[in-house]
Amino acid sequence: MAKMFHHSLLLVLLILSLFINHTEQLQSSQAQTLFRIQGLLNFPVVLNSWTKNTDFCDTEPSSSLTVVCYQESISQLHIIGKRGAPLLPRNFSLESFVTTLVKLPDLKVLTLVSLGLWGKLPGKIARLSSLEILNVSANFLYGSIPRELSYLTSLQTLILDDNMFSGQLPDWLSSLPVLTVLSLKKNLFNGSLPSSLSDLENLRVLALSHNHFYGAVPDFERLTNLQVLELEENAFGPQFPQLGNKLVTLVLSKNRFRSGIPDEVSSCYQLQHLDISFNTFVGPFPTSLLSLPSITYLNIAGNRFTGMLFENLSCNAELEFVDLSFNLLTGSVPSCLQTDSEKTVVLYARNCLANQNQNQRPMSFCRNEALAVGIPPHQKKQKEASKPVLALGVIGGIVGGIVLLGIIFLISRRINAQRATTVKKLPTRLISENAAGGYASKILSDGRYISQTMKLGALGLPAYRTFSLEELEVATNNFDTSAFMGEGYHGQMYRGRLKDGSTIAVRCLKMKKSHSTENLMRHIELISKLRHRHLVSALGHCFECYLDDSSVSRMFLVFEYVSNGTLRSWISEGRSRQCLTWTQRIAAAIGVAKGIQFLHTGIVPGVYSTNPRITDILMDHNLVAKISTYNLPLLSENKVGHGILSSGSKNSTVNERVKHEDRTDVYDFGVILLEIILGRQIKLENEVDILRDRLQGCVAADDAARRSMVDPAVHKSCLDQSLRTMMEICVRCLVKDPADRPSIEDVIWNLQFAAQVEDAWGGDSQSSDGSPVSLSPSQSQKLSFH
Ligand SMILES: *[C@@H]1O[C@H](CO)[C@@H](O)[C@H](O)[C@H]1NC(C)=O
Ligand SMILES: *[C@@H]1O[C@H](CO)[C@@H](O)[C@H](O)[C@H]1NC(C)=O
Ligand SMILES: *[C@@H]1O[C@H](CO)[C@@H](O)[C@H](O)[C@H]1NC(C)=O
Ligand SMILES: *[C@@H]1O[C@H](CO)[C@@H](O)[C@H](O)[C@H]1NC(C)=O
């Protein structure tokens, strides 16, 4: 009986599933669209299960891939790639991707996370008119939020976290009638928040952490549904935001908030998580926060809260984390916080409390500081809690700020205007010259954006020519020892000065009689082409001949003299002098890569396997990186040449090297890049493997991990997106199998991307605090690649 029941149940299920399968059979055009998406995304691992036989509407949803159908049409699509996924290749076009995507017209929920998407989000995406939830976190999208999104009247959730969107938050966001979640964390947004945000009555979550917003937070008291407000790491302030009392999470840490905490916060009966750490709050610490009915996390560290704590204060029993450290508190830690429970963390170091088990300051410190906090200009008035005066002070500050911003704006407008007239011919883009770090951006502009013709012109070198021996003798003071620079495998080097005052480097080579003149001429022809911005360029040559048969006895190769030390001396040596900033490092890396690319493809036949090392990269007075060509073994016959080359480098056979010649240089470039990123000398080969593995770990890990690995000299001034891109490409250059390494073009492209990211935010922002005053007006937001 039971068995029969079982059978019939199976039958029913079978019929049912056939039925479902039938009705939920996806339209074939939509299946085609999915395959096309798979291709456009460069066949990511997460989509490996999509094959010809896949019945999309009948796939098991997973945490990384879900397709949901409704009436033969796709209504939900979630694709979540590997964390820290690299950029999609150069030929990826977000425009065509979105054009494909909008062929799924019934999409309501779209999640495209960590897929390496890059580009400007096209407004076309608004053709997905049913869209309710859009999450495109952890990609490389830039530019502003397209205005067309305002047509998405059903949009409830918009998540653009961890991209490179920039500009100000648009006013029209308030016209999205049902917007509930707006999350824009970790982008490059700036400006102050539009007050229209307070019209978003349905807003439940507003997360703007890790951007460059500044100024006052609009009045959010009307947002009665607001539960989560995250503003961490911006420059908001100075007044505590006005908020409704439904908040559950409030994160204001690392901003410019200053004024005391209003009493209303004590009425936030649902508040669980309150983080106001690392602002400049002054005034008495409202101890009632400890006993808010729902509070579990309270962090007020790194402010200048004053006041006395008593043992008999009461706290919420659910508290799990309390951090009071780095304030000016006196008295003793409430006994309700002195639990031995492992569940509860209580930190209170660096106050002037009586409890000595966490490092405390002397009482006098807090007293003096509290007085100091109380006395100077507007704080003094605050102490008397006279609101009008405080308000005046604040307004004064704001007005001052606005005036200052106005001035900055005018100046940048002027600069823009001047640029517009003087540099019109440059089709590519403009670089801010007054960016912190001075010539850095100039180099960038030269290195990255100037067109090919400009570059050739900018080479500024005299034409390649033949020198006479007399000329070289005069220049080097008859090859005097004082002019001697060194001797390598490939002959001696001398420094010299020509009559026109230019400095040269002369390489002398003794010739064997066996060298055929024909062969020699071929090499000279090659050398004469070694002229590039990122090579130590050849200026000419000179032959000295035997008198008897007029065969060549000595050959002199004349190069430009590059005087500013090696790249290593600017990275990991000579810490006493200023080392390269992060943007300068990216520029140097681009230079080296372009030099290699030129050796490969800029001349015929290409020069491969040159085994460039960081000590072979010379810097000129503008800090343009140039690959030294002094030692290129050009004179050797081809086969011998490879022998010589192999001797200095990796343990692979000559054959393999020939096969992957270009990828060998990519490996060597990776080693240089590694040193550039880490800022420490890399001398042993096995060290490279270890460091590569660690770097790889960092690529997938978080911001903090990456920052802990990069050269401490620059870790504050680089943006995470560029750091990640640099680390990523470095790891790829250093993979064991040459076939898996990127091409040099790919390398350059990624480096340029990293540079663009930095530039979009005005180069090295030396002050990491996001101060609007320290911003250099970035001239143009256009990202262009070529
Ligand atoms: C991009 O280029 C790769 C080869 O480099 C190719 O396999 C791929 O199909 C191209 N993608 C597009 C969208 O053109
Ligand atoms: C966006 O999607 C990713 C991947 O599912 C998820 O981890 C993240 O929490 C989502 N963002 C928000 C704000 O829900
Ligand atoms: C915001 O940043 C952009 C560059 O990303 C800049 O052009 C603009 O002037 C900045 N705006 C404000 C208000 O700071
Ligand atoms: C707590 O103790 C202080 C002094 O030790 C006293 O002034 C205060 O009244 C006490 N408060 C309560 C609620 O017992």
Image (cartoon, rainbow, N blue to C red):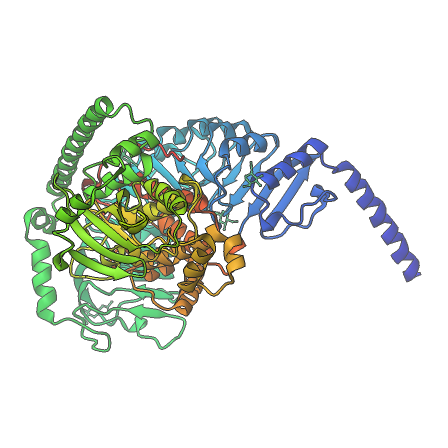
Instruction: Spot the residue most to the front.
Output: 548
Count of numbered labels shown in the rendering: 0
Relative vertical location of residue 399 with respect to residue 698 in this rendering, above or below: above
Q: Is residue 227 left or right of residue 655?
A: left
Query: Quick check: can you spot residue 718?
Result: no
The quadrant holding residue 646 is: bottom left
Q: Is residue 126 left or right of residue 621?
A: right
Instruction: Residue 510 in the image: state x and y as whole percent.
Output: 29, 56
Q: Foreground residue, 504 or 334?
A: 504
Q: Foreground residue, 479 or 411?
A: 479
Q: Foreground residue, 283 or 427?
A: 427
Relative vertical location of residue 100 with respect to residue 665 in this rendering, above or below: above
Q: Is residue 649 left or right of residue 11?
A: left
Instruction: Residue 302 in the image: state x and y as whole percent.
Output: 22, 59
The quadrant holding residue 442 is: top left
Q: Is residue 125 left or right of residue 210?
A: right
Query: What residue lies at 29% left-to-right and 30% top-to-bottom?
Result: 454
Query: What residue lies at 58% left-to-right and 48% top-to-bottom?
Result: 44
Query: Quick check: can you spot residue 752?
Result: yes
Instruction: Residue 321 in the image: state x and y as whole percent.
Output: 35, 65
The quadrant holding residue 532 is: top left
Relative vertical location of residue 424 with respect to residue 717 in this rendering, above or below: above
Instruction: Residue 664 in the image: state x and y as whole percent.
Output: 45, 55
Quadrant where the N terminus sits is bottom right
Query: What residue lies at 45% left-to-right and 30% top-to-bottom?
Result: 176
Quadrant where the C terminus sits is top left
Instruction: Spot the residue most to the top.
Output: 421
